[in-house]
């Protein structure tokens, strides 16, 4: 759930130390991040298949062939984007769980983090969801493993907050709330960011807290 868009939370100098070649320098790290941001936006707007490396290069300000200094292929670029999206969210969840706060406080903190991530990197999350099936089998398995662990943490936490839920119900609820948040990646609204974030959080928390709660009795007027 909630796997990293106007801004992309990937491509830092630390991230690229193991990549080698041009990406080892500060300039190379910055260029790599620019390529990834351009790819994210284009994959979101046009789809992976309809986007070429030349398209990505033009937006990033480099030639298409120069991208090969950072990525072996367009598929590797997609793989890096989706895996780093999953890892970014996984690390975020771990950090919040490590605080050892009461279950309801932890759930609220996770929703806060999910809202921030969505508003900052919505396009990357949509690319993650839309293009996951195009990854190579090994890449899909690796990302799926990260997702399974993250989902298990959410399900366990939600069952703590709402002990009457089954694991299957909690899992379904988490998936639906994820979809709710993803629907706001490119909002057509006049609300400022702070107010929009508050509305998103209220909707997500309200939906989760309504699970298993008795419904109000509606009395028909006569």
Image (cartoon, rainbow, N blue to C red):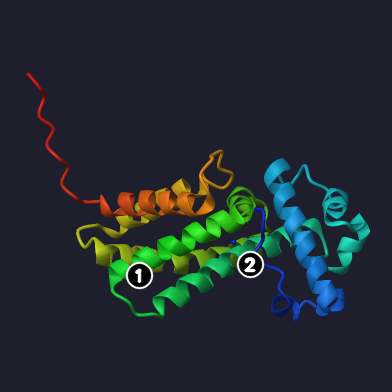
Give the camera-side residue of 217 and 3: 217
Few, some or many C-alpha atoms within 10 Å of disc 2 (few <14, some 14-19, many ≥20)? Answer: many
Q: Which residue is label 1 attached to?
A: 106
Left or right placement of residue 118 versus residue 26 in this view:
left
Residue 84's disc is 2
Q: Residue 196 shows which numbered tag? A: none
Where, by quadrant of the figure, is residue 61 drawn?
bottom right
Residue at horizontal 83 percent and vertical 56 percent from the top: 60
Residue in front for this viewpoint, 92 or 53: 92
Q: Is residue 1 visible?
A: no
User: Is 145 positioned to the left or the right of 138 in the image?
Assistant: left
Q: Which of marks 1 and 2 is in front?
A: 1
Q: Which residue is drawn at 47% across and 77% down?
A: 95
Residue at disc 1, secondary structure:
helix
Q: Is residue 80 above or below residue 200?
A: below
- Give the Cα distance between marks 1 and 2: 23 Å
Image x and y of residue 47, in percent: 71, 44
Quadrant in which residue 99 is drawn: bottom left
User: Is residue 57 visible in this depiction of the protein?
Assistant: yes
User: For numbered disc 2, what is the local secondary structure?
Assistant: helix
User: Which circle's residue, 1 or 2, is located before the other in the chain?
Assistant: 2
- Residue 74, horizontal then vertical, whole percent: 79, 56
Residue at 59% in and 61% down: 4
Front-lying residue, 202 or 46: 202
Residue 161, position as x, y percentages in the image: 26, 64
CB-based contact (under 8 Å), mark 1 and mark 2 = no
In the image, is 211 to the left or to the right of 130?
Answer: left
Q: Is residue 122 left or right of residue 99?
A: right
Q: Quadrant of the C terminus?
A: top left
Is 184 placed above or below 161 here?
above
Can you give x and y, in whole percent of width and height, for residue 102 in the image? 28, 74
In the image, farthest residue toward the top = 222
């Amino acid at each position: 759930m909630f796997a990293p868009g106007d801004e992309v939370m990937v491509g830092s100098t630390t991230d690229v130390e193991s990549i080698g070649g041009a990406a080892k320098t500060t300039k190379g790290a910055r260029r790599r991040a620019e390529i990834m941001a351009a790819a994210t936006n284009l994959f979101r707007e046009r789809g992976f298949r309809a986007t070429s490396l030349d398209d990505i290069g033009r937006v990033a300000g480099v030639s298409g062939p120069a991208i090969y200094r950072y990525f072996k292929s367009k598929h590797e670029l997609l793989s890096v984007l989706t895996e780093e999206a999953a890892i970014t969210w996984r690390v975020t969840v771990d950090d919040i769980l490590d605080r050892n706060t009461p279950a309801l406080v932890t759930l609220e903190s996770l929703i806060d983090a999910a809202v921030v991530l969505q508003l900052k990197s919505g396009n990357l999350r949509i690319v993650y969801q839309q293009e996951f099936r195009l990854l190579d089998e090994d890449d899909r398995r690796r990302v799926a493993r990260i997702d399974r662990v993250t989902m298990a943490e959410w399900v366990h936490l939600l069952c703590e907050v709402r002990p009457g839920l089954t694991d299957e119900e909690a899992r379904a609820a988490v998936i639906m709330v994820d979809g709710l948040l993803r629907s706001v990646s490119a909002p057509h609204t006049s609300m400022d960011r702070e107010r929009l974030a508050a509305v998103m959080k209220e909707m997500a928390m309200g939906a989760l807290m309504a699970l298993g709660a008795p419904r109000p009795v509606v009395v028909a007027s006569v």
